[in-house]
Image (cartoon, rainbow, N blue to C red):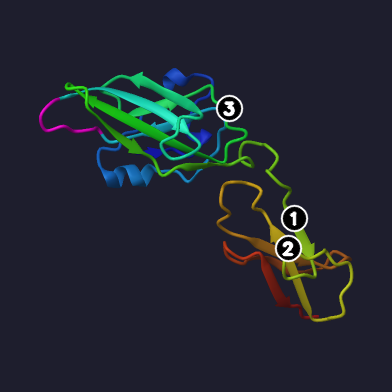
């Protein structure tokens, strides 16, 4: 089972007119799986139909938690047995870092099976909230643990360190640019990858 990522796919003003998504197999589900959630009030989850060789599935139950299999956000509640998706609304995820969805399916004998999602990060930045801690950029250092510098001795090398980890959604790419105090561009925005927090370059001229 998976969670969809963003509010750009959802109609907040009229939940009854949501588009429908289906994942009839594992590949379809993984193709729709989101990594970061852009909404803090609703989430759309999908799952493959449960199968039982001997009896029919007579009902599903859905829950949301901040831990795998947990129910801290939304306790289990029943949905139609023919459903393979559910839009959960009226949530407050402003203090949640990651959401895990759980679905239980029951057969006619009352036995149940459970599927737990791999979780989706809540992007505070996308939701317009302040990060859990401020984003920081420091000049002249190669570690964010060091103090920001106002002066340096080198005339050719510059370094900077940054930390954007205050948003639970993982950063995939960093770009940085360098401008002189007179506004002249020494380096345009340059991709430095998704895992770096420090970078030193040689400035010409």
Q: Earlier in the sequence, mark 3 or mark 2?
A: 3
* Residue 7 visible in the current orientation: yes
Above or below residue 50? Residue 109 is above
Image coordinates for residue 5, horizontal then vertical, percent: 48, 39
Vertical arrangement, residue 78 with respect to residue 149, above or below? above
Q: Residue at x 35, y 29 (%)?
A: 85
Residue 95 relative to residue 185: left or right: left
Q: Residue 20 vs residue 198: left or right?
A: left
Q: Earlier in the sequence, mark 2 or mark 1?
A: 1
Residue 144 circle label: 2
Q: Which residue is mark 1?
A: 136
According to the picture, the residue beneath numbered tag 3 turns out to be: 92
Query: Residue at the location (41% across, 44% down)?
Result: 118
- Please report contact status of discs 1 and 3: CB closer than 8 Å, yes or no: no
Instruction: Give residue 77's position: percent from left, percent from top.
Output: 39, 20
What is the spatial separation of the Cα atoms under label 3 and label 2, in whole angstroms? Answer: 32 Å
Q: Are the residues tagged 2 and 1 within 8 Å (C-beta)?
A: yes
Q: Is residue 53 magenta?
A: yes
User: Magenta region: which residues?
Assistant: 49-55
- Label 1 crowd bin: few (<14), some (14–19), many (20+), radius 10 Å: few
Res. 18 visible in picture: no
- Percent x, y of residue 31: 36, 46
């Amino acid at each position: 089972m998976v969670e969809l990522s963003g509010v750009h796919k959802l109609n907040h003003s009229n939940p009854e007119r949501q588009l429908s998504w289906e994942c009839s197999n594992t590949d379809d589900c993984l193709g729709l799986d989101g990594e970061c959630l852009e909404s803090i009030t609703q989430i759309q989850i999908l799952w493959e139909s449960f199968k039982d060789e001997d009896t029919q599935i007579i009902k599903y139950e859905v829950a949301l938690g901040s831990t795998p299999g947990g129910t801290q956000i939304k306790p289990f509640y029943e949905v139609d047995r023919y459903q393979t998706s559910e839009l959960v609304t009226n949530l407050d995820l402003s203090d949640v870092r990651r959401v895990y969805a759980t679905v239980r399916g029951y057969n006619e004998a009352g036995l149940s099976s459970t599927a737990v999602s791999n979780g989706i990060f809540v992007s505070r930045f996308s939701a317009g909230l302040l990060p859990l801690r401020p984003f920081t950029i420091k000049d002249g250092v190669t570690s964010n643990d060091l103090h920001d510098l106002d002066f340096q001795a080198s005339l050719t090398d510059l370094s900077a360190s940054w930390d954007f980890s205050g948003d639970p959604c993982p950063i995939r790419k960093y770009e940085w640019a360098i401008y002189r105090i007179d506004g002249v561009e020494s380096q345009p925005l340059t991709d430095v990858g998704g895992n770096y927090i420090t970078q030193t370059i040689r400035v010409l001229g």
